[in-house]
Every structure is written in C-alpha cells, then in structure tokens.
Image: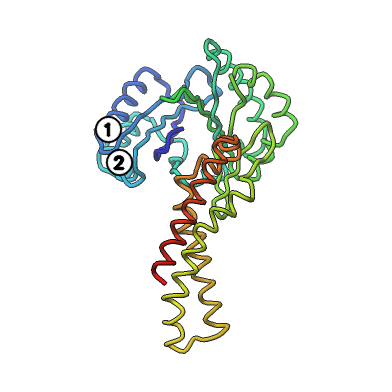
Amino acid sequence: MTAVASAITTFHPPSDPDRFGQWIATYLASARQSAGHVSARQSVQESAQLDWAVQVSFDDADLLDAWLDGPQRAAVLSDGQANGWWQRRTDLILVPGEPPPADAGIFLHSVAPGKETEFVAAQRDLTYTSSSFAGYEGTAVFPADSTGQWMSLLRFRTPSQLAAWIGSQERREALPRLRGELTRDFAELPHSAPFGSTIRIDHGHTRITPAWKTAMLVLLCLYPTAMLLTEFLSPVLEHVGFTGPLSFFIGNVVSIVALQWVLVPAASLPFRRWLDPIDGSSVRISGGGAAVIVAGYAVLLGIFTLAA
C-alpha cells in the first residue's frame, strides 16, 4: 500500500447491482475531479458474504478530508440515499503514520498469478467462519492495486472481539487454504506503537521493531531536544523563579510531550521501512538505516559544537 491517505466506504448490498454500479461510477468521478486524487478501487462483489465497498485515495490527508466533507460528494451520497443506497457504517480512514482503527483488521496479500478466483473463494469461506464470532460486522476484499497487492478489511464491533477472532483456533485452521493462493504470507497493515515502533502480525505471531532501532531513533530526537531545552527553556524558567527540581521536571514534561507526539512521529516517516519488523529486517536495510541515523548524530554534534 502506498503512502497516501485513503477512505474506505462500505454500503448495504444493493437490490439492483447494475444501477448501483452506475451510481458508484458517479461517486468515484466526484473523487477524480477533486484535487489530490490518486486512485480508487471497488471491492470484489462476487459473493454475498463479502461487503460492497470502495476505497478512494488522495496524496494528502487534508485533500481527502476536503473531498469527504465537500458539497460534491454530499450531493452524490444524497442522490444514492434517495435510491436506497446507504452507507453501512462510517468511513474508515487510513492515514500514513497513524495506526488503523483498533476494531479493524487490514491485511495485504500477494496473490499468485492465476489464483485470483481461488483466493476470493478462500476469503469467502474465511468470512463465513468469522461471521459466527461475536461482534463480527463484515469483510471487504479489494483487488490488486498499482503495487500488485490485494487487501482485505475485517471489521468487528470492538477491538477485543477482533483479537478473539485473530487468535482463535477456527482462524488458524482456515488460514492454510488462504496461504496456498499467495506467493508469500499475508501481512497485517502496520500498527504504530510508542516512540516510533511498528507492530506487525507474521504467521500469527506479533512482531515489533527491534529495541535497538527504536533507541537509535529516540536518541536522534532526544539529543537536539535536550540541547535546545538546556540552552533556551532552562534560562527562561530560572528567570521566572522555577529553579532546581521543578525546572528539571518541567523540562522533562516538555521533552516527553515533544518526543511522543511531535518529533518521533515526524522522524519515523522517512524511516518507516527501516522500522518495520518484517520489511526492514534484512541486513542491508537495517545497516543502511543505522548508517543514516549515525550520520544524523554526526551532523547534530557538529551543529551544536559550532554553536557552543
């Protein structure tokens, strides 16, 4: 999946698929005519077990929001509702650097050439099995995008109900057939963890960014933060009477807030692949990313040395 902002909209099954298809074409046209539009795709609609959904992608989250909230889309949705075509649930938004909703399982698949029909059938059977679990709300399967990856979206009412299905014996027994139609094992869309770590599910096991990578990234952000706070914030706090432990405490609060919600998320973006516990696990990628960060250390040391 490319680094774009996407909205996935799911609809109730239409009574007249042909007319619904014509309306969906109008819906997608409204997106194409908007600034920042990148791509769109409809879910596979070959089975009653699978949801009717569309995914629209923009190259910027703000431009995606502008289309989602704009009058053109609102008019198309209003026309669809007049014909009985209502959204089944609220839009699901995927934004680079932000984890997907905790009640949604999003999986990427590399389907073997010529195995597309068998893959969809396996997804249909997997959906039938998952539908017996508490809180199940639906599954949408999207055909290959420009990178060749298929995507499946599984939604439950609560995160704990989704986790119960993912860890169930029924799912483990159903997965071998699905894996048989792939060129490599499927991967769950990454979830972000504190301080830049990335969480992935691989062969049913949870994998997270190695601690040494997280530590290197945090140090890249922490060093300049500490230097700037020492040079600028500490004198200001002392001037207004906050000295000793209180000044140190305030500096730590500012540092933690800046690291957790601003600096580390921003620094993680160019290192997304390096931090990925699966895609970034090779020696070449791990070593290359580490070298870049070490170079960053050297640059920062040089800057603060010259400024001292």
Asked whether residue 113 appears in the rendered view, the answer is yes
Task: Label 1, secondary structure: give it.
Answer: helix
Q: Please state which amino acid type lies under the numbered disc 1.
A: Ser
Report the quarter where the C terminus lies.
bottom left
Does 71 sit left or right of 262 as displayed? left
Query: Is mark 2 in CB contact (under 8 Å) with mark 1?
Result: yes
Q: Which residue is mark 2?
A: 67
- Residue 280 picture location, percent across and down: 56, 38
Q: Which mark is residue 43?
A: none
Examine the rendered structure and indicate whether residue 17 appears above or below residue 256: above
Give the image location of residue 168, x and y in percent. 72, 34
| Residue at screen point 53% across, 10% down | 114
Q: What kind of residue is marked 2?
A: Trp
Position above or below: 62 against 54: below
Residue that sits furthest to the top in the current view = 114
Label 1, on which residue?
Answer: 30
